[in-house]
Image (cartoon, rainbow, N blue to C red):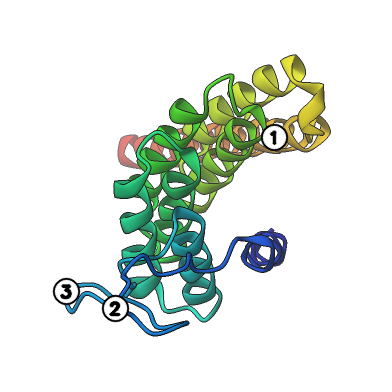
Amino acid sequence: MYRFLITVFISIALGSAAIAQSTDPGAKAGEAITDSANTAPKNYTYEGLLALGHGKYVAQDYTAAMEAYEQARTREPAKADAYYFIGMTLRAQGDYQKAVSMLTSAATVAGEDAPKMNARALFVIASTWELAHNLDKAKYAWIQYKAFAKLHPECNPFIQVADAHVNAIDNRNRQVSDYAKVNERIAANAEGSDNSKKKE
């Protein structure tokens, strides 16, 4: 899963638009207008900021990646991509709760206008809950992903993957329940044995 997500990042980074041309007539050709408070030049496009973030993410410079993505989100708050990649960066840092929150925002902003991004965000939400070892929320998220994916076959959905994860979670829950019942019987038998010895 991690290698798949890294591959997605690299492909997006290579396909993203480069830095926009400077709009400052006093700037030299190819010169970026920089802001000392930010790592990205002022004349970066939304796509350029995302590309900058992707490069930082792949290099595991998550602080710089987050800054670039946040600038992109501020510039185009109605576009889902920046929310998604902020969520991915938080996930990479192990902040799963905030990652899910941002990925949920990505899915909401994407809505029905960008079903592929919506589906992608829902998929990663489910896998993030698994990383956080919250299997109840993971199962619910996989079911949500499957429901949306079935309505949008154009997204090339991974419905079988969702089913496999739900089944695996159910199997694990059954095993935990069976193990707890066995422990209860062992404890009950041990208590009964102790009581018998006391009566003797």
Is the C-beta separation of discs 1 and 2 under 8 Å? no
The residue at the point 62 percent across, 30 percent down is 142
Residue 158's quadrant in the figure?
Answer: top right
Q: Nearer the viewer, mark 1 or mark 3?
A: 3
Which residue is labeled 1 in the image?
171
Tag 1: Cα neighbours inside 10 Å, few (<14), some, or many (≥20)?
Answer: few
Q: Residue 111, position in %: x, y?
A: 52, 22
- Front-lying residue, 103 or 193: 103
The residue at the point 52 percent across, 81 percent down is 59
Q: Quadrant of the N terminus?
A: bottom right
- Front-lying residue, 188 or 130: 130
Q: Earlier in the sequence, mark 1 or mark 2?
A: 2
Amino acid at circle 2? Gly
Which residue is labeled 3 in the image?
37
Q: Residue 130, position in %: x, y?
A: 54, 46
Is residue 152 toward the left or the right of residue 139 in the image?
right
User: What is the C-alpha distance between the residues marked 1 and 3?
Assistant: 51 Å
Which residue is labeled 2 in the image?
26
User: What is the C-alpha distance between the residues marked 1 and 2?
Assistant: 66 Å
Q: Which mark is residue 43?
A: none
Q: Secondary structure at mark 3?
A: loop
Q: Does the rendering let one see residue 40?
A: yes
Q: Quadrant of the C terminus?
A: top left
Q: Residue 172, position in %: x, y?
A: 64, 39
Amino acid at circle 3? Ala
113, above or below 71, in the image: above
Tag 3: Cα neighbours inside 10 Å, few (<14), some, or many (≥20)?
Answer: few
Q: Residue furthest front?
A: 25
